[in-house]
């Protein structure tokens, strides 16, 4: 692994040292990026009453923020390749802080859309992508551990921010809470300052990778689609399509497994975030007090914190690993069942039971989301696959919460929102299960055909070797007979009469 990694990166990652400080900075950045849009929902009920708007309109705040965070991934990647992770994360932290301070002075809901949704979402995108990228530069052998520690920031921050936001609201109101949160988000700048560029022989690791053209020879994948060569040369600037092809491998749209994964995920994301966004408002609607409603998100985050590494260990076993797509399908299906049963629970402890089950399946889905994509396309095409998936998932991420809020406005009850999300998640899980079953069958058939062809080639090679051996033996025998004939003639001539 070490030699392969060194040849691919152009250097040998240190796998430690200052890298652990970088992991701590990534822990902060990733924690804010994933947890902040969800913890912000604590303020939604009061903001809706302040502006006199509907549930659908207030849901656009988190929806736009999440969608921009996903859509800004390719932009963030380009900036990281050009300037490095440290300045991009610091810029993202400043954008997040300024956006929340500006949002505290908002006079209309449109101002919140712009400040929190667009500016804040883009700032979170600048925090997320560079943090994931720089870990790969510092770690290779210990990269799963480093990524796991950094990704643990999401449930830890969600568990902390939910009750903290409720305290800030009770003490300072939603405007004062936004102002203080804006100051807290400036800690992302501190996290970014910890992401020191890795210097190898007087040059940073990013420059070592950017100076030379990166050429990946095409190799057939399991689905028979060749991994296209990626040549980052000035020729890529000839046209817009060539520039896109340099960053994103469009041949993935001919990859059967990738298409199945993409369709299932786009359907899943229509109902993935809405239950978490509306969980605290739903608890308040059911008569639960503010702090108890916020504690539901904390309970969910605690279970999520345990479910992610547990799912990773389960997926790495020799029984699950070959068919890990089935575990992903099961997690999504189980998620849908939990949402369908949520309106049937009663009381605070019933909601706690729902939050625990939801946190378990939410952690399972998050732990398997990119692992299953890596399992399908392989490490060589993974970067392009992530870019394409995040771009196309922006639509369901953007529209899912407002549609759920519109159902609450239409029926005056949260039950139909949970039914819609549960039905969507259940459909996505069953779709992925059925399609992955056929995909695995096709892959097994192709594997058997390949094995039979290899076995046939081996037999042909053995036959050719045997035939060549026979020809050699016959030639040796003929040569031996030819050699014996002159000797017999000479003995006959030399014998006395």
Image (cartoon, grey):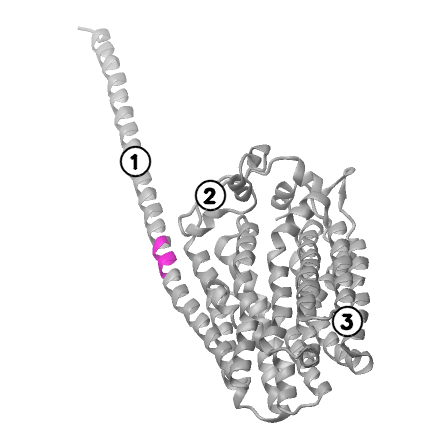
SS under mark 3: helix
Q: Position of residue 258 (x, y in %)?
A: 46, 56
Residue 93, quarter of the rendered image: bottom right
SS under mark 1: helix
Disc 2 packing (10 Å; few <14; some 14–19; many ≥20): few
Which residue occupies 69% across, 42% down?
A: 11
Question: Sequence-wise, which precedes: disc 3 or disc 2?
Answer: 3
Q: Position of residue 14 (x, y in %)?
A: 73, 49
Q: Main secondary structure of the magenta part?
A: helix
Q: Quadrant of the C terminus?
A: top left
Find the distance from the CA under tag 1 to the CA under tag 3: 79 Å
SS under mark 2: loop
Disc 1 packing (10 Å; few <14; some 14–19; many ≥20): few
* Region in magenta: 441-446
Q: Is residue 316 visible?
A: no
Question: Sequence-wise, which precedes: disc 2 or disc 1?
Answer: 2
Q: Which mark is residue 178?
A: 3
Q: Give the residue number, with chain letter if any, for mark 2.
A: 219
Which residue occupies 52% across, 39% down?
A: 242
Q: Which mark is residue 464?
A: 1
Residue 398, quarter of the rendered image: bottom right
Find the distance from the CA under tag 2 to the CA under tag 1: 29 Å
């Amino acid at each position: 692994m070490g030699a392969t990694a060194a040849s691919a990166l152009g250097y040998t990652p240190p796998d430690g040292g200052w890298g652990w400080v970088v992991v701590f900075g990534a822990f902060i950045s990733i924690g804010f990026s994933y947890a902040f849009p969800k913890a912000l929902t604590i303020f939604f009920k009061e903001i809706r009453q302040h502006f006199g708007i509907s549930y659908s309109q207030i849901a656009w705040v988190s929806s736009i923020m999440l969608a921009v965070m996903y859509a800004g991934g390719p932009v963030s990647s380009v900036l990281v390749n050009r300037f490095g992770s440290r300045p991009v994360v610091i810029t993202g932290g400043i954008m997040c802080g300024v956006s929340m301070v500006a949002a505290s002075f908002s006079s209309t809901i449109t101002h919140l859309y712009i400040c929190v949704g667009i500016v804040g979402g883009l700032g979170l995108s600048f925090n997320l992508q560079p943090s994931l990228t720089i870990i790969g530069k510092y770690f290779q052998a210990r990269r799963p551990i480093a990524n796991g520690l950094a990704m643990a920031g999401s449930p830890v921050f969600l568990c902390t921010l939910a009750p903290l936001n409720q305290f800030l609201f009770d003490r300072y109101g939603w405007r004062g809470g936004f102002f203080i949160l804006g100051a807290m988000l400036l800690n992302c700048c501190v996290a970014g300052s910890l992401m020191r560029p890795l210097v190898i022989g007087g040059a940073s690791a990013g420059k070592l990778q950017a100076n030379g053209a990166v050429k990946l020879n095409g190799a057939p994948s399991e689905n028979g689609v060749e991994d296209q060569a990626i040549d980052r040369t000035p020729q890529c600037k000839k046209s817009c399509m060539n520039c896109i092809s340099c960053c994103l491998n469009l041949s993935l749209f001919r990859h059967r497994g990738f298409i199945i994964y993409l369709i299932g995920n786009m359907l899943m994301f229509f109902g993935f975030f809405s239950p978490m966004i509306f969980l605290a408002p739903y608890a308040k609607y059911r008569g639960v007090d503010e702090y108890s409603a916020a504690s539901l998100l904390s309970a969910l985050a605690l279970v999520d914190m345990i479910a992610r590494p547990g799912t990773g260990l389960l997926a790495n076993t020799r029984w699950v690993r070959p068919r890990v797509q089935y575990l992903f399908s099961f997690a999504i299906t189980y998620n849908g069942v939990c949402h369908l049963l949520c309106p049937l629970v009663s009381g605070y402890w019933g909601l706690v039971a729902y939050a625990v089950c939801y946190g378990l399946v939410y952690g399972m889905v998050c732990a398997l989301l990119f692992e299953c994509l890596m399992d399908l396309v392989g490490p060589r095409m993974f970067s392009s696959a992530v870019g394409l998936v995040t771009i196309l998932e922006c639509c369901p991420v953007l529209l899912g919460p407002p549609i759920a809020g519109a159902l609450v406005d239409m029926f005056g009850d949260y039950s139909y929102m949970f039914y819609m999300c549960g039905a969507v998640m259940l459909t996505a899980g069953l779709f992925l299960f059925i399609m992955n079953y056929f995909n695995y069958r096709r892959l097994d058939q192709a594997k058997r055909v390949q094995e039979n062809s290899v076995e046939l080639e081996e037999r042909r090679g053995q036959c050719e070797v045997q035939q060549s051996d026979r020809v050699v033996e016959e030639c040796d025998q003929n040569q031996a007979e030819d050699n014996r004939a002159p000797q017999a003639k000479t003995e006959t001539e030399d014998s006395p009469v």
